[in-house]
Amino acid sequence: MAAVIRKATEADAQVLLPLVQEYWHFEDISGFDLGRCGTQLQRFLSNAQLGAGWIASDDGVEVGYLLAVYVFSLEHLGITAEIDEFFVLLPYRSRGIGGKLLEVAEVEFQRVGCTNVSLQLSRRNSAARTFYHRYKYAERYGYELLDKMLRG
């Protein structure tokens, strides 16, 4: 059976949390807190102005997700989408699930009027880099991401 991609709703926060936890572990992101992440995920999924999310299921099992936030950018002359989290469980990779998630998300980005889509990528994740290149994503030469945490 082919994977099914559907838009996530606020009710899906609890379904997504185990996948989020797995993604954070995979990317070595510290600080996963079930309660805090659940609260913020529900907040995000209940407000379409913040962005959108999708869930991939295979035979009724949730195997991946994509979350994207919407940001105004003067440089890009409008609303842009930033893929904040995108993950497919390891046993389900190379089956086209990630590509389907990305394609469905890009259609929605265009529908809501986004002028650009961007994402952050770990320098050590060469498999993801190859995947994104296949979908015409490219490095923005001369730029790198800087960040600062404002709250703990």
Image (cartoon, helix red, strand yellow):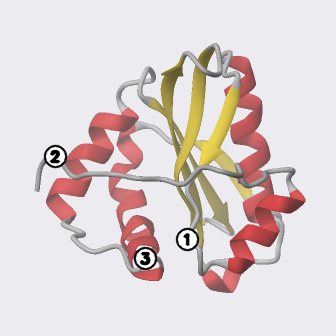
Q: Amino acid at mark 3?
A: Glu
Residue at label 2? 150
Indicate the position of residue 112 as horizontal and vertical percent values: 65, 17
Between the residue at mark 3 and the residue at mark 2, the CA separation in whole angstroms equals: 25 Å
Do the CB atoms of the residues marked 3 and 2 lie less than 8 Å apart? no
Q: Say which element carries label 3.
A: helix
Q: Earlier in the sequence, mark 2 or mark 1?
A: 1
Indicate the position of residue 8 as horizontal and vertical percent values: 51, 42
Q: Residues within 10 Å of mark 1 (few under 14, many from 20)?
A: few
Residue at label 3? 22
Q: Residues within 10 Å of mark 2 (few under 14, many from 20)?
A: few
Quadrant location of the N terminus in the rendered image: bottom right
Q: Residues within 10 Å of mark 3 (few under 14, many from 20)?
A: some
In the picture, residue 115 is in which quadrant? top right
Residue at label 1? 122
Q: Is residue 42 left or right of residue 127?
A: left
